[in-house]
Amino acid sequence: MEEIIKELHSLKLSGMARLWASLGETKRLDKLTLVDGIMLLLQAERDTRTTNRNNRLVKEADFRYSATLEQLQAGSHRGVDSNMLAVLGTGSYIDKGEAILITGAAGVGKSYLATALGNKACHQGYKVCYFNMQKLLGKLKLARVDGTIIKLVAKISRVDLLIIDDFGMKALEGQQQNDFMEIIEDRHGQKATIIVSQLPVANWYDVMKGNTTAADAILDRLVHTSVRFELKGASMRQKSNIKSTETHRND
């Protein structure tokens, strides 16, 4: 028994090793046919590899929050259509290379929704990258200085789902706008992109008015065929702070 487990681990078949050990402990080995046993071992290994892959994808995505669609509070009062969420949860928008625009005031759950969609995508086997807009611009600027800009833009352009949070906090200037346009241009119709912003979409042009040609190109590719969420309601952060304060008072 121990020799088999050791051999399975040496072959990097940890899922099989765990199941074999469990079957031995529960005295089920003798009750299985050879075919049934092999099928169980293969399924265990497949499940383990899928879980490991999904966990790796979530880690590499570098989300700001831990969020899932199942935990999300949907409803028209918040601007989150449950039917649309169900459709997006299938990942079909990623296969189609569609854009999702999420807007609303601070604290209404924009980043949470984007992260929940990203987390779901990771568990469906898609590669996801999550960026705060200013950090993305910083990475692009540094890459331009050290000569790796082409490699970085290519990497960002290839990812299955790109999430850009806090868009519009600062106006895009010169090269920033050109870099952003290149990424959006490369991804348009090929790879899915989620943009999160406190600004209404109608005000996005003002963020990029330094180069009207680039602004027109970016908005044309993002806005006209996108899925939109305009989140509403009270700040979830304020509610959380109120609950925390009440808890401390009760203590």
Image: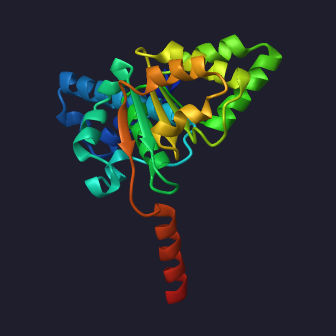
Q: Nearer the viewer, residue 37 or 229?
A: 229
- Count the numbered circles shown: 0
Residue 133 lies in quadrant? top right
Farthest-out residue, bottom: 250
* Residue 81 vertical position relative to residue 43 in the rendered view, above or below: below
Residue under the point 79% across and 13% down: 147
Residue under the point 27% across and 53% down: 76
Q: Is residue 75 visible?
A: no
Residue under the point 25% across and 46% down: 82
Q: Is residue 58 visible?
A: yes
Q: Position of residue 50 (x, y in %)?
A: 39, 29
Image-based side of 143 in relation to 245, left or right: right
Q: Position of residue 201 (x, y in %)?
A: 46, 37
Q: Nearer the viewer, residue 133 or 159?
A: 133
Residue under the point 52% across and 13% down: 186
Q: Position of residue 99 (x, y in %)?
A: 41, 27
* Residue 33 vertical position relative to residue 152 in the rendered view, above or below: below
* Residue 10 vertical position relative to residue 81 in the rendered view, above or below: above
* Residue 189 vertical position relative to residue 37 in the rendered view, above or below: above
Q: Nearer the viewer, residue 70 or 142?
A: 142
Q: Nearer the viewer, residue 213 or 118?
A: 213
Q: Classify the position of the N terminus by image quarter.
A: top left
Q: Position of residue 78 (x, y in %)?
A: 34, 55
Residue 214 lies in quadrant? top right
Q: What's the colour scheme?
A: rainbow
